[in-house]
Image (cartoon, helix red, strand yellow):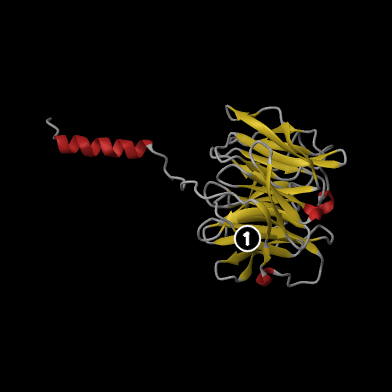
Amino acid sequence: MKISTAVLSIAAALATLAAAPSTQAAACTGKAPAGELVAQRIAAANPDRKEPGLYEGPVWIKDALYFSDFTFGPGFPSRIRKLDAAGRVSTVIEDSGSNGLAVDNDGNLLAATHKYKSVSRYTLDGKRSEVAGKYQGNVFNSPNDMAMARDGTLYFSDPAFQRDAAPGGQDQTRVYRVAVDGGVTVVDDTLINPNGVSLSPKGDVLYVNGMVGDHGVLRAYAIVNGKPQQGRDLVSPLGIPDGMAVDCHGNIYVTEHTDKRLRVFTPKGKQIATIKVDANVTNAAFGGVSGKTLYITGAGAVWKLDLDVTGSPY
């Protein structure tokens, strides 16, 4: 059968499109922050209940910010809240039992659930399923933060901060890897209460922070053939570290809980900026219409800071 030149050209074009990634990442433009900055509190997100607690796990999905809101009462009751583009706050999942949040490759919420001592998946209408529930036959301590690679591999921290939320747990605190087939392995068991977890923009470096002795560290693990290698301390010392975010240039935004600030470090560990807030701080994520707003959670507060660069949505 004779095939025309035009048909061949169309076929070649379609083949090129098929070979391209299904989703093209936006070009990384703009400058990272520098110097000392101050984030502004979002008044609409102030607490509507009297019990003391924390906001945690900010994640930007589509056109809204989702975050956990938990108290320090028995079981650490937690719900997932939503801050929409119009500034309205609503409750999405009333009894989530969650701390850190992320988004999976299908747009569902991933939740580090201290209530279930596991990592859970929630659809946005509240249906829960389990992603990782046990290691060596035992439930986890209190999963805290996580990051998912493009291939679906999940990394999460398991400190002991909310270990009393439910019975059982592990004999020590660790960082874990969950393979796409559900297998759970240990990345690091030498950090005391590992906390924040992030991936570099290319997915070739895993970042985790936690305590070593009486000071915090930011640790980097090169990922080779999908497996994290031995970690090295990129920044030390830190204050008490909590969650993190990463911008498109690879700079790491590390929260220091009781210091009421984030510090921004280059991929080589050089500090380039400090972002201050007015209460204890827990975590950060990029979002907003342009993807250049840094949202920060903490002790009963959500702050925001407009930047000149895009970054990770959790």
Q: Decide if residue 232 is in sight here.
A: yes
Query: In front here: 314 or 78?
Result: 314
Residue 184, picture quadrant: top right
Q: Is residue 227 above or below residue 167?
A: above
Q: Position of residue 241 (x, y in %)?
A: 77, 47
Q: Residue at x 57, y 37 (%)?
A: 203
Outermost residue toward the right in this view: 214
Q: Position of residue 314 (x, y in %)?
A: 62, 51
Q: Residue at x 21, y 36 (%)?
A: 9
Q: Decide if residue 139 is in sight here.
A: no
Q: Is residue 67 above or below residue 200?
A: below
Residue 202, picture quadrant: top right
Q: Is residue 139 left or right of residue 88?
A: right
Q: Which residue is mark 1?
A: 305
Q: Amino acid at mark 1?
A: Leu
Q: Position of residue 250 (x, y in %)?
A: 59, 42
Outermost residue toward the left in this view: 2
Q: Residue at x 83, y 44 (%)?
A: 168
Determine whether the residue tagged by mark 1 lies in a helix, strand or loop. Answer: strand
Query: In front here: 229 or 259?
Result: 259
Q: Residues within 10 Å of mark 1 (few under 14, many from 20)?
A: some
Quadrant showing the N terminus: top left
Q: Position of residue 174 (x, y in %)?
A: 77, 37
Report the label total. Answer: 1
